[in-house]
Amino acid sequence: MASLVSTLKAQSRPARTRMADLCRRNGLSDLFPETVCDAGAVGFLLATLPRGQGPVLWVQDRVSAREAGVPYLTEMQSGVPLLRVQVGRAADVLQAMEDGLGCGALAAVVGEIWGDPPALSFTATKRLALRADSNALPCWLVRRAGAPNLSAARNRWRVTSAPSAAHPDDAKAPGAPRWHVGLFRSRQAKPGDWMVSYDRAAHCLDFSATSGDGALAEMGRAAGERAAG
């Protein structure tokens, strides 16, 4: 049994690396918090952002800031300097994001839009996707209280907070942050569901497939069948 577990871990490592790389690729991605005020979704997003490559432009509409709060992590805590902008309307968020994607000094662009405003059309997402691709920047659109309507995003994620991992030295202290993460539509990978943990020191995400979902779980079933046979 121990050898089977070791084999599974070794086989799954490339797939886990691919998933961690996927959420850090350039281009437009959608992120849907499972509940509208779940701050864990923002934590997951922060864990994907590049370090040491310049500031990140973070744009919110007024409703998102009022209902879900604003990101508040200093550069020392997160390693990612944030340039936070609050505007009144979804159309203003989209315009600021598009302008930011044309700035070579930024490392990434994030926008938060509440609900399903008319300004957030497929054409609007296509403009963001083209600008992000042409300038080789990660671009995230956080959709609180929104439906997964037609979008030009390469990858579309759902994120839910999960209990932290066990602390290695103190059972009463919180350990590494974790999230339930679902990739429900993608042009670059097979959809699936994962438990994701974050190593702050290494700035590294670890994807572990949940039972019955994702490429890692399929790999586990196949290995189990081979062992049984």
Image (spheres, grey):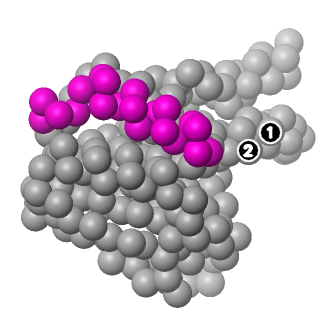
Q: Position of residue 138 (x, y in %)?
A: 54, 48
Q: Nearer the viewer, residue 201 or 67?
A: 67
Q: Nearer the viewer, residue 189 or 98?
A: 98
Judging by the rendered image, the residue that carries numbered circle 2 is: 17
The CA distance from mark 1 to mark 2 is: 5 Å
The residue lying furthest to the top in this view is 229
Q: Nearer the viewer, residue 14 or 76?
A: 76
- Within 10 Å of disc 2 (Cα), the crowding (few <14, some 14-19, many 20+) is some
Judging by the rendered image, the residue that carries numbered circle 1 is: 14
* Residue 137 makes an appearance in the image: yes
Give the magenta range. Answer: 117-136
Please determine whether, in this image, residue 214 is positioned above or below residue 43.
Answer: above
Please report contact status of discs 1 and 2: CB closer than 8 Å, yes or no.
Answer: yes
Q: In the figure, is residue 212 to the left or right of 149?
A: right
Q: Amino acid at mark 2?
A: Thr
- Residue under the point 17% across and 60% down: 87
Q: Position of residue 65 (x, y in %)?
A: 17, 63
